[in-house]
Image (cartoon, rainbow, N blue to C red):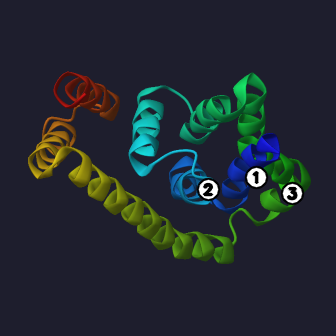
Amino acid sequence: MIYWQIFLAFFIPGILGYGGGPSSIPLIENEVVDRYGWLTVNEFSEVLALGNALPGPIATKMAGYIGYQQGGVLGAFIGIFATVAPSLILMIALLQLLYKFKDSPQVKRMTNYIRPTIAVLLGGMTVDFFSASYHDVGTWQTLLLAVLSFLLMEKWKIHPAYVITLSLVYGALFLG
C-alpha cells in the first residue's frame, strides 16, 4: 500500500504541475504534508532546501528522498518514476501535436493565464514556511535569515545554492 501512496503522491503533482518543479512543489507539499502526513511543514522546507542545494530537477530529488524515507530503495525508484512518468507519457503520446501547435496564440495565452496561479501557489507555500519558521525558531531568527538571504542574492548576486548552504550551516550551528 505504501508504494501505491508514494506513486500517487508524486504522480498527481506531476500531472497537475504545469511548468516543472517550481509549480509542482506546492502540490507535492500538499500530498506529503497534508494528505499523507509523512513530513511536517518544517521538515518539508528542509527537504526542499536540501534539494535546491543539489544539482538537477528539484521534484525528482524530493521524490527520491521522500520515497526512500517512506519505502526504501524501491520507494525511491517509484517516487522518481511517478514524478517523470506524466511528462514521459505525454511527450511520447503528444509529441507531434505539441510540435504542431507550439507557436499557437492560444497556447501562449494559456501559459500566460497559468503563471499567476503558480505564483499564488508558491506564495502560499512561502507563507506556510515563514509561519512554521516563526513558530519554531522565533521572529528574529526568521527575519535575520530572510533579510540576509535577500541581500546576498539580490544585492551581492550570490548564487542561491550558496545562500541555502550558508543557511543550513547557520541552522546547524545556532538553531539545532
Is there CB contact under 8 Å for labels 1 and 2? yes
Element at label 1:
helix
First in sequence: mark 1 vs mark 2:
1
**Rendered image quadrant of residue 15:** bottom right
The residue wearing badge 2 is: 31
Kind of residue sitting beneath label 1: Leu
Report, in whole angstroms, how far the alpha carbon at label 1 lies from the one at label 3. 22 Å
Outermost residue, right direction? Answer: 93
Q: Residue at x 58, y 45 (%)?
A: 38
The residue wearing badge 3 is: 94
Rendered location of residue 150, percent (x, y):
18, 45
Rendered location of residue 173, percent (x, y):
19, 22
Taking 5 as reference, is 55 left or right?
left
Viewer-nearest of discs 3 and 2: 2
Report, in whole angstroms, how far the alpha carbon at label 3 lies from the one at label 2. 27 Å
Rendered location of residue 18, percent (x, y):
63, 60
Which numbered tag is attached to residue 8? 1
**Rendered image quadrant of residue 156:** top left
Report, in whole angstroms, how far the alpha carbon at label 1 lies from the one at label 2. 9 Å
Kind of residue sitting beneath label 3: Leu
First in sequence: mark 3 vs mark 2:
2
With respect to residue 48, does 130 lie above or below? below
